[in-house]
Image: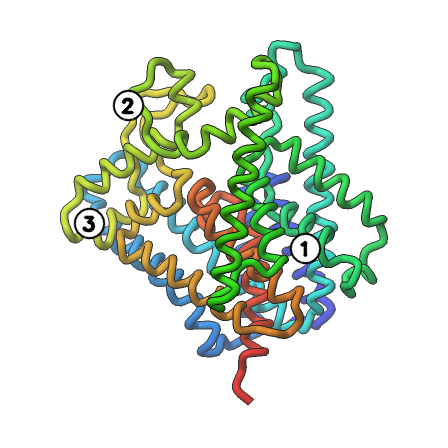
Amino acid sequence: MIRSKSADHLVIVLLIIMVFLSEIFISSGVSLVAGFLILALIFNRSIKINKGEISLILPLFLILIIGIIGSLFHIKVASEGFGYLIAKDMWYYTKPIIYFLAGLYLYRMKLKKEIIISILIYLSLVTAIQHLIRVVIFFITSPAEDLVLDTIRIRTSFVNLTEAYSLAFMMLFYNHSDVKKYIYLPKWLIITILSASILLSFSRSLIFSLIISLLALNDFFSFRLNTFVKSTVKILLILLFIILTLVIINRISNKDSLTHAFTEKYLNSVKETTYPGPFSSNAVLNRNWRGYEAHLTKMEIRKGNLFERFFGYGFGKTVYIGKRGYLGESLENIPKFHNGFLEILLKAGFAGLLLYLIFFFYIFRLADRTKPGKETELLFKAIILTALLTTYVLTGLYNKSALDSSCLLLGFFSGISLHFNKPE
């Protein structure tokens, strides 16, 4: 039985809220429930996927198949609990496909892009406010010795990329966009709340995503040669300015201050994601954990034969690290990695990584050819590039929940772009 359109609208609103706010709730449970509801809704409406849509999601689907088949080849030598790890990986690699389809479904429902963007802004505000409340409570209730950068980040840890998209859009497009018809709060208030949340997250990934979004919305990224050349020069100058500013602030700030720790962490970003070991203590290891994790993953990949390097070890594969403590947690095997490119190489091989890059190439090319309205094209590009580049530090589309809403938006804007790129 096919439901009424009003019932569908109610279900999709609930799904959007669940996906966008998954960081507030129990993320894995929310994403699982939302995913099954989306599938039920899509199939209940008997929506046929056209060739253009199939070509977009095919690379992600093939990565899923490669990972499943690879796990079958290694299941005999697996450790206890391997079945759970396979199931978990299968969900992480299925989720982006489901949410992308949900975004296409939103487009099929003929929802205006202004409504979707306004929902994005409202729900970003909700996440920002709850984050700021947690930060305030932490500063009020914590002893002085806990008011250091690493402790603040652990206790109030928060990454929601929708805040970056929303803030960039509010700063650059809000005044001349129809979105303001659906926003009933002052622009300055929204910008203040989102800015405060992003800054107090002390998250390099979130601040980096804001910078990428601002550049994308200023039309810095394109396959057009003249845009590419000009943008490359400008971006290099911007990076040079940011690095020099961080160095100066770091040198003049008190070594025991949050400012010094904050700038020190940014200046250590490249070193931290490589392998600067051996480490003199667990504290040093924790500060450079991503590089250590990446080093072990590369070593594991190199152990593989030609087939395993090309197609990976499959889902459920972990990397043994010994009994190590990371941020207070006892770890022996790493099942999930910060560097998504290395994770894909490990679990789906070179073929999987190539397919992942092809997916982003396809949708960026689609966005670059689209002219349905400047704000739509550029916001689409901002989401694409942020999702791709955060793969290096957040596992990208295969993150636990940080990019759920991004996948939904990628599907929605892909629907718009496919429609405007149809031959007459």
Disc with the residue nearer the chain's start (1 vs 3): 1
Q: Give the secondary structure at mark 2.
A: strand
**The one of 20 and 263 positioned closer to us in this rendering:** 263
Say whether residue 419 is left or right of residue 86. Answer: right
**Residue carrying label 2:** 322
Q: Are marks 2 and 3 in contact (CB under 8 Å)?
A: no
Disc 1 crowd, CA 10 A, few/some/many (<14, 14-19, 20+)? few
Say whether residue 116 is left or right of residue 337. Answer: right
**Residue 323 point in image, percent of width and height:** 31, 20
* Disc 2 residue type (three-letter): Gly
- Of the 4 image quadrants, the one containing the C terminus is bottom right
**Residue 143 point in image, percent of width and height:** 66, 10
**Residue 9 point in image, percent of width and height:** 70, 65
Q: Give the secondary structure at mark 1.
A: helix
Badge nearest the viewer, 1 or 2: 2
On residue 14, which mark appears? Answer: 1
How much space separates mark 1 and mark 3, taking CA atoms? 42 Å
Disc with the residue nearer the chain's start (2 vs 3): 3
Q: Residue at x 32, y 36 (%)?
A: 81
Q: Is residue 40 visible?
A: no
**The one of 226 and 416 positioned closer to us in this rendering:** 226
Q: Residue at x 73, y 52 (%)?
A: 170
- Asked if residue 384 is positioned above or below residue 267 in the image, the reply reads below
How much space separates mark 1 and mark 2, taking CA atoms? 43 Å
Say whether residue 39 is left or right of residue 54. Answer: right
Disc with the residue nearer the chain's start (1 vs 2): 1
**Residue carrying label 3:** 308
* Disc 3 residue type (three-letter): Glu
Badge nearest the viewer, 1 or 3: 3
Q: Give the secondary structure at mark 3.
A: helix
Q: Are marks 1 and 2 in contact (CB under 8 Å)?
A: no
Residue 287: which quarter of the image? top left
